[in-house]
Image (tube, rainbow, N blue to C red):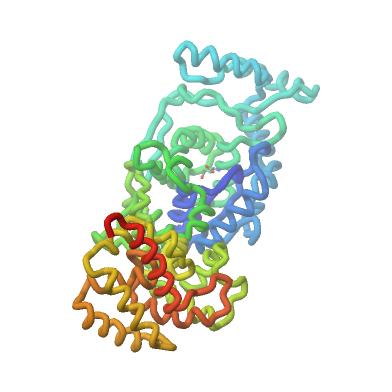
């Protein structure tokens, strides 16, 4: 059997993580079986569908490198792939079902149906169509339609068990009489989801329907439609709902949910997909969780997908992203970081090759502290922004300064630094040795005050990495001037004098 799967989003909003996981599982299943991945746009809800969401969701999928073989933009043998371009198919098949008396015209008004629903809800019954128009003789009904009466087409549901096998959830069944007669064609000629979906899945020769658990209740209706149309059921695999850590359905409250937000936050697409793959599935080899696209494709196993709800865990996503970031080449990571630094106004819109080369050193100095690319802003702040007046008042810096001998180290460091025109790494290390000798301080007691003297901060990347960055950076034409080391130490000492003068009892 040639595997054909589809991802069938409705362009009624942004793609969220649940949708993306569905797309991913479909894509992985297609690729590992040398199958076909179809992208179908389910836009028959005319009031809520917008073409901008269609564009956006395709951009999101492209960003994630989830490519499709058939779809609205690339075409394919079983198109069109946008449901509003397939209305004639739905209308023709609904007509056929009416002719076969498997479906019928219903003339009940929207208001009447709503009233019926309210009464059923109030009396604790499941809302279901009463069947009022079920027995109108077909000729009479067609005549009313010809005469211009407004009508929908309803599928006749049946008594008895409606059942299907699900790859994830096993045997599922429901009593047919609980389903009620449901609409397959609206009065405006569009088809609701269930009918359009079944016809498209059949006509597009879909072999496996992989989608969210929320669609299980629809699947029973769809099974009735497959029966009525005389088609064989595809394989179904429903994916458990993704919950937030508090056990409720993932929503805005839990942080970013649209794919674009993850992109803006600086998550790598490969890491996001790696993490989403783990929401409901685990590789056979325990602890072997950081996987590339290729590894995921080789290892993913639909039959091992878990039916219990998956919990979205930001800490784990950060960890997965961090692990992927560590494998990104320095030039690429620099390119990824540039837009964030530009947003801060720290580097020019068109950085010169020298600036890019220097930025690569900057990024390499901080890359092990990054969870996301956007973290580059926070981690390089101490390189681009030097503000002793503000930063020295930080309690952690104050604490470092209050250590015995700390101020003396800074004074010594200041005095030694003044004698050098250029402070390259070697010179700096020589200066540090002298300060060590003169003050008798070592280890933390030596380097902590030197860090404060250079950055006015209490923590940050290795000083050995920062020195060349400051030295080279001061000569570059950057919107955010990189303060030279001598000026830094001088400014820190000046502020320190003010600070010391204001200390009680000094
Ligand atoms: N348009 C439906 C949705 O976005 C597709 C469901 C399905 O895959 O059948 O939920």
- Along the horizontal axis of the image, is 432 left or right of 76? left
Rendering coords of residue 317 (x, y %): 37, 55
- Name which quarter of the figure residue 401 lies in: bottom left
46 is higher (above) or lower (below) than 476 = above
225 is higher (above) or lower (below) than 444 = above
- In depth, the one of 432 and 491 nearer the eye is 491
- Name which quarter of the figure residue 349 lies in: bottom right
Q: Quadrant location of the N terminus?
A: bottom left
Task: Residue at 51%, 14% (x, y): give it.
Answer: 120
- Tell me how many marks there are: 0
Rendering coords of residue 19 (x, y %): 49, 48
Q: Quadrant location of the C terminus?
A: bottom left
- In depth, the one of 248 and 58 nearer the eye is 248
141 is higher (above) or lower (below) than 495 = above
Rendering coords of residue 202 (x, y %): 55, 46
Task: Residue at 24%, 59% (x, y): give it.
Answer: 286
- In depth, the one of 485 and 425 nearer the eye is 485
Residue 291 can be seen, yes or no: no
Rendering coords of residue 17 (x, y %): 46, 49
Farthest front residue in view: 505
Task: Residue at 38%, 42% (x, y): give it.
Answer: 244
- Along the horizontal axis of the image, is 189 left or right of 32? right
- In depth, the one of 498 and 203 nearer the eye is 498
Farthest right residue in view: 147
283 is higher (above) or lower (below) than 463 = above
Residue 308 can be seen, yes or no: yes
- Name which quarter of the figure residue 136 lies in: top right
């Amino acid at each position: 059997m040639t595997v054909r799967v589809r991802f069938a989003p409705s362009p009624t909003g942004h793609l969220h993580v649940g949708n993306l996981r569905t797309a991913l599982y479909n894509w992985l299943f297609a690729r590992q079986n040398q199958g076909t991945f179809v992208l179908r746009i389910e836009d028959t809800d005319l009031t809520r569908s917008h073409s901008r969401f269609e564009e956006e969701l395709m951009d999101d999928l492209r960003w994630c490198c989830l490519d499709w073989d058939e779809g609205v933009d690339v075409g394919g043998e079983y198109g069109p792939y946008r449901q509003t371009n397939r209305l004639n198919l739905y209308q023709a098949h609904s007509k056929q079902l009416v002719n076969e008396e498997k479906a019928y015209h219903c003339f009940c008004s929207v208001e009447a149906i709503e009233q019926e629903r309210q009464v059923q809800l109030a009396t604790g019954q499941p809302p279901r169509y009463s069947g009022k128009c079920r027995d109108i003789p077909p000729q009479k009904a067609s005549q009313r339609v010809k005469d211009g009466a407004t009508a929908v087409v309803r599928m006749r549901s049946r008594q008895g068990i409606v059942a299907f096998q699900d790859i994830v959830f096993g045997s599922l069944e429901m009593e047919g009489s609980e389903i009620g007669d449901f609409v397959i064609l609206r009065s405006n000629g569009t088809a609701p989801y269930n009918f359009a979906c079944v016809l498209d899945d059949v006509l597009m020769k879909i072999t496996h329907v992989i989608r969210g658990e929320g669609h299980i209740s629809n699947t029973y209706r769809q099974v009735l439609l497959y029966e009525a149309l005389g088609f064989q059921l595809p394989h179904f695999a429903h994916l458990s709902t993704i919950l937030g850590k508090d056990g409720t359905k993932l929503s805005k409250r839990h942080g970013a949910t649209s794919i674009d937000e993850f992109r803006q936050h600086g998550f790598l697409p490969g890491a996001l997909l790696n993490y989403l793959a783990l929401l409901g599935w685990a590789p056979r080899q325990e602890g072997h969780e950081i996987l590339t696209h290729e590894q995921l494709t080789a290892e993913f196993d639909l039959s091992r997908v878990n039916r219990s709800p998956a919990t979205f865990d930001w800490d784990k996503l950060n960890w997965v992203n961090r692990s992927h970031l560590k494998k990104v080449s320095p030039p690429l990571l620099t390119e990824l970081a540039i837009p964030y630094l530009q947003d801060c106004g720290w580097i020019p819109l068109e950085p010169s090759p020298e600036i890019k080369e220097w930025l690569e050193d900057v990024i390499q100095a901080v890359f092990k502290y990054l969870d996301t690319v956007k973290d580059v802003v926070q981690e390089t702040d101490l390189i681009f922004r030097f503000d002793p007046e503000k930063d020295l008042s930080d309690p952690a810096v104050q604490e470092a300064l209050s250590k015995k001998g700390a101020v003396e180290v800074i004074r010594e460091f200041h005095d030694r630094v003044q004698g050098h025109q250029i402070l390259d790494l070697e010179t700096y290390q020589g200066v540090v040795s002298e300060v060590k000798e003169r003050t008798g301080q070592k280890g933390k007691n030596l380097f902590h005050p030197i860090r404060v003297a250079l950055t006015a901060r209490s923590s940050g990347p290795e000083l050995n990495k920062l020195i060349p960055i400051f030295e080279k950076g001061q000569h570059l034409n950057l919107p955010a001037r990189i303060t030279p080391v001598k000026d830094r130490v001088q400014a820190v000492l000046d502020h320190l004098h003010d600070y010391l003068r204001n200390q009680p009892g000094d």
